Structures are given as C-alpha cells and as structure tokens.
Amino acid sequence: MLQIQDNMDILSNLTSRFPTFLLTGIPGLESAQAWISIPFCCLYAIALSGNSMILLVISTQHSLHEPMYYFLSMLSATDLGLTLSTMSTTLGTLWFDAIEVSLDSCIVQMFFLHGFSVMESGVLVSMAFDHYVAICDPLRYTTVLTNSRIIQMSLLVIMRAIILILPLQLLLKPLSFCRINTLSHSYCYHPDVIKLARSDTQANSICGLLALILSTGIDMPCIVLSYILIIRSVLNIASPEEQQKALSTCVSHIGAVAIFYIPLMSLSLVHRYGGSAPKMVHSMMANICLLLPPVLNPIIYSVKAKQIRKAIFCLLPTK
C-alpha cells in the first residue's frame, strides 16, 4: 500500500494539470537565431502582403467577380490564416526567446493551424471542381457555379474544418503531461504534442486518423480524379493550340496543390519515420511546410493569371 502511495506521489510530481510547453527555434543554431529571423520575417511579410493584395484586387475589381477568383480569394484568406496562426510564436521564439506556452494557448493555436490547413485542402478541391466544370462542361459553367452554390461550398469547407479539428483539441484537455514539455517546432503541432502525453492517447489517435481520412484522404483523390477527367476531355480537342490553352488554365492550381500537399506529406513522414533525423531537419521541414503555400501562391497566381496581374498594376500608384 505504501509503495502504491509512493508511486502516486512520484506520478503527481511528474505530471501537472497546468503543463508548460517549450517551443524550439532552430536546434543547433541558437546563437544565430536573431539572424535567422530576418529571412523568416521577410517570408511572413511576403505572405501577408501578397495574400492581402490578392484579396484587395478581387474585392475591388468588378471584372474579377467570377467563380474562379472567388475561390482564389478563399485560398488567399486561408493562407493569411495559416500565416497568422504561427507568426507570433515563431518570431517570438527567434526574436525574444519567448518559448513558454500553456496547454490552453497550444490548443487554441492548433485549432487555427490545423483548421486552416483542412480549409485550404477543401478550397483546393473546390478550385479543382471549378476547373473541371470550366473545361469539361463549359456551357453549364454559369448555371453550375452560381453565387449561392459558391457560398454553400465555402460554408461546407469551414464547417468541415471545425467539425474535424475541434474534437481533436477537446480530447487534449483530459490528457496528463509533464510539468515541462519540449516541442520540436516554434509552434504547437498536434502529433508533436500527442507524443508528449503521459496518459492513454488511443482516442486521440483514432480521432486524428479519422480527421486525416475525411480531409486529405478524400480531397487528394478528388483532385486527382478531376484532373484525369480534365486531361481526357482536353485530349478530345482536335486543335493542339486549344489543348495548350485549356491546360494552361490549370497550371497555377497544379502548382498550388503541389506546394501544399508535398511539404505536408513530407512533414508527416519525418514525424513518423524520421526519428533518427537531426532535430534541425524537423524544425526546417515544419517551417517550410507552413510558409511555402502562403508565400508562393500569390506569386504563382500573379504571374500566371493575366487578369490578376493587370488588376494589381491598376491599383499601384502611377506618376
């Protein structure tokens, strides 16, 4: 009986109802973090200004009030959300060595971080559907993608993210953690936090797997299927010039899909199988995964979409 009581005392000393999580900057480069923060700051500035510019030109230019650009504005909004969800902790860690966060703060950050990630995946599927209708059934484009249907699709994307991500965060509250827990990144990431739990996480793992299947597990096959149908439709076009023109409208979206899913899958693989990889690899992969889409999406669409480029030039002050 005395031994059981001693074990309980040890456990209570190890775990805490109010655990503290320590964020990690760039392992092995702590002395250079002030310098490393400069490119990070530039990337955040590019992401914020680029996506804000896309939203501004689409909202102010009536010529861009079309389904394709509505979906692009949704993509920019989710990219802004992703950027803002990690910017404060990442720059705080690199600039001020502000590495301590509470469990509640971690849960809030993970809700927005993973929520916007699921939303971005849903927006990419919506954009793939937009391209499919525009190329495979152009005569019904305006009747299929009406304003009311676009609003319904937007609400569905938001509601799915909330329904999938909220239970994941609520299931973290009952878990036991050590008083001090060191994370692998400069922000709270759900698989990273779960690994530090000192109690049964089976329910969390099942819920996380379901969320993954019902988001990425559905979205990626839908995008692939849409492009199989698009390619089949394009190959039926007799003129090579028309084929090239049809496929060129998809280049920007394919780029957005690649820069979102490839780093995301790479980060998941590093977390699952990269235990022997240096901590610096984990940290750099984590930051690249979240910064690439918000930084590159506005650049890709500004370069490839003539209407967006023209609208941006119209907003710029002229002498």
Image (cartoon, grey):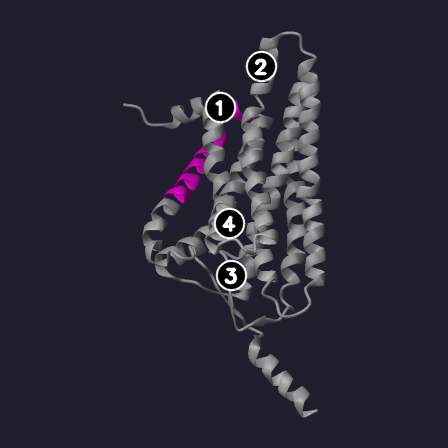
Query: SS class of the residue under badge 2?
Result: helix
Query: SS class of the residue under badge 1?
Result: helix
Residue 106 against residue 73 in the figure, above or below = below
- Mark 1 residue type: Lys
Q: Could one spot residue 142 in this view of the protein?
A: no
Packing grade of label 3 (10 A; few <14, some 14-19, many >=20) is some
Q: Dot 1 corresponds to which residue?
A: 304
- Cα distance, mark 2 to mark 1? 14 Å
Where does the C terminus fall, quadrant-wise? top left
Where does the N terminus fall, quadrant-wise? bottom right
- Cα distance, mark 3 to mark 4? 12 Å
Q: Dot 2 corresponds to which residue?
A: 244
Residue at the spot x=64%, y=33% of the render? 126
Does label 2 or label 1 sit earlier along the sequence? 2
- Cα distance, mark 2 to mark 4? 36 Å
The boundaries of the magenta stretch are: 42-65
Which residue is outermost to the left? 319
- Cα distance, mark 3 to mark 2? 48 Å
- Mark 4 residue type: Ala
Q: Dot 4 corresponds to which residue?
A: 286
Residue at the spot x=57%, y=46% of the render? 116
| Left or right position of 35 against 309 | left
Residue 251 position, x and y percent, is 55, 25
In the depicted view, which residue is nearer to us: 230 or 36? 36
Query: Tag on residue 183?
Result: 3
- Mark 3 residue type: Leu
Residue 136 against residue 212 in the figure, above or below = above
